[in-house]
Every structure is written in structure tokens, then in C-alpha cells.
Image (cartoon, helix red, strand yellow):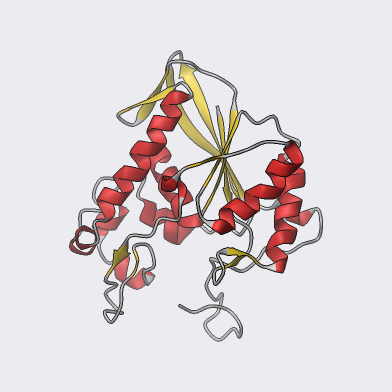
Amino acid sequence: MKLLMVRHADPDYSIDSLTKKGWKEAEYLSERLSKLEVKDFYVSPLGRAKDTASLTLKKMGRTAVEYKWLREFMPSINRPDKTERSHIAWDWLPQDWTADERYYGADSWWDTEIMREGNVGEEYRWVTESFDRLLAEHGYCRQEHLYRAEEPNNDTLVFFCHFGLECVLLSHLLNISPMVLWHGVCAAPSSVTTVVTEERRKGIASFRMLSFGDTAHLYVHGEPPAFAARFCECYDNEGERRD
């Protein structure tokens, strides 16, 4: 089975939709995805993800199943360096979270004072358990760190979602801490991440990432990826986000 996780195109957060550039990215994405044989489409309930999906679905004459757990991963924490207001659980300064080794562990990152106060572990479990129920419907049942291939298949599933949520799903499939992904990788708007099952012994499947944040559909049109989700390459760079 193949899973395609698509981050929404360049967002206009003020209206929960897309920028002019984002609509162009969504069109180029639809040209790419509409060539695929897709078993099922799934989409976040947030407008920017639904708008991104809309062009592909219209082109293919398809619909997508909407799941609340595919929305952006948004539990709040009190960030150590900014206590005047709450922040999303994965918006940290690297020098703060990397100082605590627990954040590197797949089974310990959520069990810290800050994460417990924000009930981040509960939100993570709700998302990943919902995800596993869906995978079970498609023939793959979670068993500890692997999956029983009860009905193995070569189907393709497409998820239109969000960067933070995508990292949650990947961390679960790959059995690693999402903190490492949230801060160590960056999925540009409209990018496609591909994960496949590998069944090296009959009935025992694991997931492997073939590509992360692929923007080939933009490249072929000469369209540069949007800067959204990144921070400044150099601190003094003008026009690039610092925090």
C-alpha cells in the first residue's frame, strides 16, 4: 500500500484558504495527482487543505472523506522562552527542546512537564489511533511497531493535510519522535510525501518513506516553492521569518 501525504498549498491563514500563488500550486499539484490511480482520498476539515484538494478532486470527478483528526496538530503549550502566551506544541526554539534528551525518544517526548500540561500526548494518541483504525480498514493492523498485513494490497491513498499533522503520522509509522521531524524536516506548501509498505516476510509489514516533501510538480513549471514553514536561513536575511 502506498500513502501520499500532501501538505496544503501556500496558505492565507487569515481566511483559512490559499494565496494566489497557492491556487497556482494546487493546479500544478492536480496535474500530477490526477494521473495516478487512487483508491481513496482523505482531507482535513480546514479550508486551506480542502481548497488544495478541490482542484484534484474536480479534475478526477472524485470526492474525499473528511476527518477531524486530519486537521493541523494544534495542542498548546507554554513555551519556555515566551510565557506570556501559549504556542502550538511543536513551535519551539531548537536550543530549548534539544537540551532535554526526552524529546528525542519515541516513547518519552510527550512525557515532559510542558507536554503533559498541554495534554499533547492525549492529542497524539487520538490522531494516531484514528489513523490506525483507517489503516486497518485498508488491510493493515498495528501490532506493536509493525503492521499485520491481513489484506495486503497495492492501493494508493492520498491525504490532504498539514505539516505538523503529517509529521505526527510519519512519526507513528516510522516509530520516532515527532519533535525530530517537526524541527528537522520541512514540507513546502503543496509538497508530496510518499510512504509505502514493505512485506519482507508474509503477513508482516513495515512502512518506509520513499520521498519527503517532493515539489517536482512545481519544478516542471518553473514555480519556486513557497517559503512557508521555513525560518530565516541567516538571521539578518530580510523578509524571512525569524519566529
- On the picture, is 29 further left or further right than 42? right
- 232 w.r.t. 69: above or below: below
- On the picture, is 135 further left or further right than 21? left
* Quarter placement of the N terminus: top right
Q: For the view shown, which residue lies furthest in the top direction?
A: 202
Is residue 152 in sight in this rendering? yes
The spot of residue 82 in percent (x, y) is 31, 79
- 103 w.r.t. 85: above or below: above
- 11 w.r.t. 69: above or below: below
- Report the number of discs: 0
- At a point 61% along the width and 83% down the height, the residue shown is 239
The spot of residue 76 in percent (x, y) is 31, 65
The spot of residue 38 in percent (x, y) is 65, 31
As rendered, which of 124 and 238 lies closer to the eye? 124
The spot of residue 162 in percent (x, y) is 51, 54
As rendered, which of 19 and 202 lies closer to the eye? 19
- At a point 74% along the width and 56% down the height, the residue shown is 218
Is residue 175 in sight in this rendering? no
- At a point 50% along the width and 51% down the height, the residue shown is 45
As rendered, which of 61 and 181 lies closer to the eye? 61
* Quarter placement of the C terminus: bottom left
Quadrant of the rendered structure where residue 189 is? Answer: bottom right
- At a point 50% along the width and 35% down the height, the residue shown is 208
- On the picture, is 229 further left or further right than 127? right
Quadrant of the rendered structure where residue 187 is? Answer: bottom right
Quadrant of the rendered structure where residue 17 is? Answer: bottom right
